[in-house]
Image: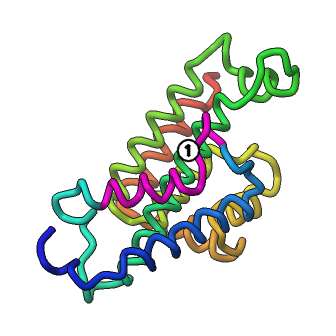
């Protein structure tokens, strides 16, 4: 990655990332370890490893946008959301009726889940590298689909419900998203 990282206070960045990981876990009310044993320290190490292994420093550019610590906090946040999503899919006992009702409700017909995953992947490809829109898309899988989706998304993303509404508007204004949404609605529309 060259000399641009010679004078970086890596110990300070480590502490910042560790504090951010703890904050996310507390904010989302997650146990000290989740997703099969991931801890705050694991999230920090995973984030720094991804940064150091990347040939271009995960596309971070000094002087363009966020400070390195802030940028890495965003990377850590995304990794946290990925782990949380995975934990929500498998973190429970099949003997627990509440878990099986919540997580295995599509077990007889996996098609809806596969269709949603395909839609999610298509949307992520369309929005590209926009971290806010990518987080919005991936966070939708963590909601229960109830009447307070904007509030749920706001809590997951660490934003206000108003910010979530604005993010949804931004998403719909991305070229190709409305068309993708309409295609999905057509598929789900009952045939008469």
Asked whether the viewer can see residue 150, the reply is: no
Q: Position of residue 129 (x, y in %)?
A: 33, 62
Task: From the viewer's perspective, tell me whether residue 53 is left or right of residue 109.
Answer: left
Residue at position x 13%, y 78% in the image: 3
The reply to whether residue 139 is in sight is yes
Residue furthest front as drawn:
11
Percent x, y for residue 40?
59, 56
Q: Position of residue 61 (x, y in %)?
A: 24, 78
Residue nearer the viewer, 153 or 17: 17
Quadrant of image for the N terminus:
bottom left
Name the main secondary structure of what is drawn in magenta. helix
Q: Which residues are magenta?
A: 34-51
Q: Which residue is mark 1?
A: 83
Q: Is residue 188 above or below residue 3?
A: above
Colour mode of the rendering: rainbow
- Near mark 1 (Cα within 10 A), the count class, few <14, some 14-19 or many ≥20, is some
């Amino acid at each position: 990655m060259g000399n641009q990282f010679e004078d970086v206070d890596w110990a300070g960045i480590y502490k910042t990332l560790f504090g951010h990981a703890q904050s996310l876990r507390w904010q989302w009310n997650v146990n000290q370890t989740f997703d099969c044993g991931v801890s705050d320290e694991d999230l920090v190490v995973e984030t720094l490893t991804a940064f150091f292994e990347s040939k271009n420093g995960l596309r971070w550019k000094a002087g363009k946008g966020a400070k390195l610590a802030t940028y890495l906090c965003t990377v850590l946040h995304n990794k946290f959301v990925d782990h949380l999503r995975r934990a929500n899919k498998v973190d429970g006992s099949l003997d627990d009726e509440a878990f099986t009702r919540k997580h295995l409700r599509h077990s007889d017909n996996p098609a809806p889940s596969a269709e949603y995953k395909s839609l999610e992947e298509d949307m992520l490809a369309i929005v590209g590298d926009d971290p806010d829109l990518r987080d919005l898309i991936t966070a939708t899988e963590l909601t229960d689909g109830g009447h307070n989706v904007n509030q749920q998304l706001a809590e997951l993303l660490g934003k206000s419900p108003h910010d979530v509404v604005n993010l949804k508007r931004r998403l719909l204004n991305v070229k190709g998203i409305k068309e993708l949404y309409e295609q999905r609605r057509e598929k789900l529309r009952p045939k008469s």
